[in-house]
Amino acid sequence: MSDEHHPARPNGRSVYLETFGCQMNVLDSELVRGQLAALGYGFTDDPTSAAVVLYNTCSVREQAENKVLSRIGRIGVWKKRGHKVILGVLGCLAEREGSAMLRKYPQIDLMCGPGELDNLPMLIDNAMKTEAVEVADRVALQGNKTRRWATLAAAEDNLELLDLSRSFDPDRASAGGRSAYVRITRGCNKFCTYCVVPYTRGAEVHRPPDHIVNECKRLADLGVIEITLLGQTVNHYAYTHGPAVTVNGAEAAQVGPGLSAFASRGAKPQAARRVTTFADLLKRIHDEVTAVKRLRFVTSYPRDFGDDILAVMAECRRICRYLHVPAQSGSNRILKLMNRGYSREHYVEFIDRARAALPDVSIAGDIIVGFPTETDADFEMTKDLLRRVRFKNNFIFKYSPRPGTAANARLGDDVPPLVKRRRNRDLLALGALISAEVHAEYVGRVVDVFVQKVSEKTTKRSAPGGGRVQLGWETPPIQMSGRTGGDLITVFDVPASHSCDDLVGRIVPVRITGSGPLILIGEPVVDQAQGAAYPAAMVDS
Ligand code: SAH
Ligand code: SF4
Ligand code: F3S
């Protein structure tokens, strides 16, 4: 996008939508896209030619916010030069900042928190009609802030309707339209002291199991073979049948319990009420939606991950042996200050239990370095945890103080930036060593790889032949990239007999021949009897 380019008359109903942040936002953007497409809006990849520019934002760290603020600044420059465009800020930053941001950035026409996305078309429509210039005419819809403290009338939760009206577009979805996200819970009730999510996404709301299963079935009918269930703490999913119904008597979304409501072995069923637990939900999707070959879920919470869930995972081969289960720190003192509700010993006990039930499970996580008061000794405990658990990988974040959170109010931000940077670097180096060992163990094995795309290496080289394979002396083979069930990135060269278009969105057996800290390298298993073709039984099974 160029600062110089600012056409005076952008295309009437074209929308540019850019997404920042987590998978929740990716799914929200998909819902927004479907909702606006149904109303006759078109989409463009070029913000300069759009009538409406929407940023779906993240607020989890300051850096995430800065990214979008620079985009907003750029649109401000365009508008000053006379460029006509409606600028909408959606998502977690809109929820956190709301009208304060409208006052600061006159170029923003509307803001819409994640809990109000069902109202977005109305907001855009109003902005188009009024071409508002006064701050007073512009709108910031922040639902979760108010909703959190009021009783959430789940039956009135229009967001559920937005999820239900989802129109999945395979052309836009990843892995050739064969991979999709499905939300099981919204929001979070855990209140980790550093985190904005409970404030931006509001109270934890659990979707009715029938809605979730039906959504999975609809996606499978559209060709989806990989489904990732989404929630901030998926293992705490528990739907109590009975109390939450709509006016028509159908089941409605329902507010979930906080951390204190959990016993040590999973969600406590309410007396005499039937409860669908996360284990039940996984089993139902696995058994009722057999066209889905890979069922995965993020994010797991290290506390109260019951043996019932592990047993379902062990029993059902189509549920991926993969857990993203952030530890955040290896120091009990820091975990306590974070209000995580578990100790390092609990965490390790869970990992051992998971590995005993699922010997081939791969474990990933998140770590925060430089949390307030973190000493070198605390940090050593985190390094020690990495060695003990042998994670496939960890996302490592430098602590970022977030306005409105308890840690920010009570603990400040006393670890100097240089120390945070050093700990970040040290942990990345240690993590890379461990990941390299974990990946090296796969060399010589055959793994099933869900092929997602042409690899970045090939894309950078600007693939000849428009994505079709053209083998010859001058043309290096195209490299594809995909993931194992355990989420290990795997690359391989397309064999002469195949085109990459045939492979995207399929599951193919790959023999691993090499590895690095972040990837496996392999070659597809070719059926000798049939020449170059993959054995039919092993593809997509
Ligand atoms: N619900 C998930 C995490 C959601 S946020 C869980 O509880 O595990 C994703 C990650 O961002 C967190 O796991 C944490 O590592 C990181 N994060 C959240 N707030 C942060 C902050 N203020 N500073 C740095 N990292 C943060
Ligand atoms: Fe944030 Fe904690 Fe909730 Fe995760 S569990 S979203 S870190 S408050
Ligand atoms: Fe960011 Fe909101 Fe997700 S703060 S991480 S987009 S829930």
Image (cartoon, helix red, strand yellow):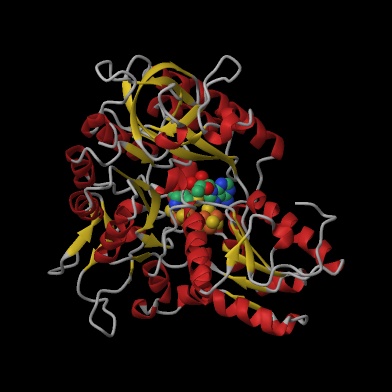
Which is nearer the eye, 24 or 174?
Answer: 174
Which is nearer the eye, 441 or 266?
Answer: 441
Q: Quadrant of residue 261?
A: bottom left
Which is nearer the eye, 418 or 317?
Answer: 317
In the picture provided, is 84 more to the left or to the right than 314?
right
Q: Number of numbered discs present? A: 0
Relative image position of residue 513 (x, y in whole percent): 41, 15
Which is nearer the eye, 62 or 38?
Answer: 38
Is residue 161 visible in this depiction of the protein?
A: yes
In the image, what residue occupies the spot 39% across and 64% down? 204
In the image, what residue occupies the spot 76% across and 68% down? 105
Relative image position of residue 409 (x, y in whole percent): 61, 59
Q: Quadrant of residue 357?
A: top left
Q: Quadrant of the C terminus?
A: top left
Relative image position of residue 18 (x, y in whole percent): 61, 56
In the image, what residue occupies the spot 19% across and 46% down? 308
Residue 150 versus residue 62 in the image, above or below: below
Residue 40 versus residue 302 in the image, above or below: below
In the image, what residue occupies the spot 37% across and 80% down? 153
Residue 304 versus residue 512 in the image, above or below: below
Q: Quadrant of residue 374?
A: top right
In the picture provided, is 513 more to the left or to the right than 356?
right
Is residue 195 visible in this depiction of the protein?
A: no
**Which residue extends farthest left?**
272
Relative image position of residue 287 (x, y in whole percent): 18, 50
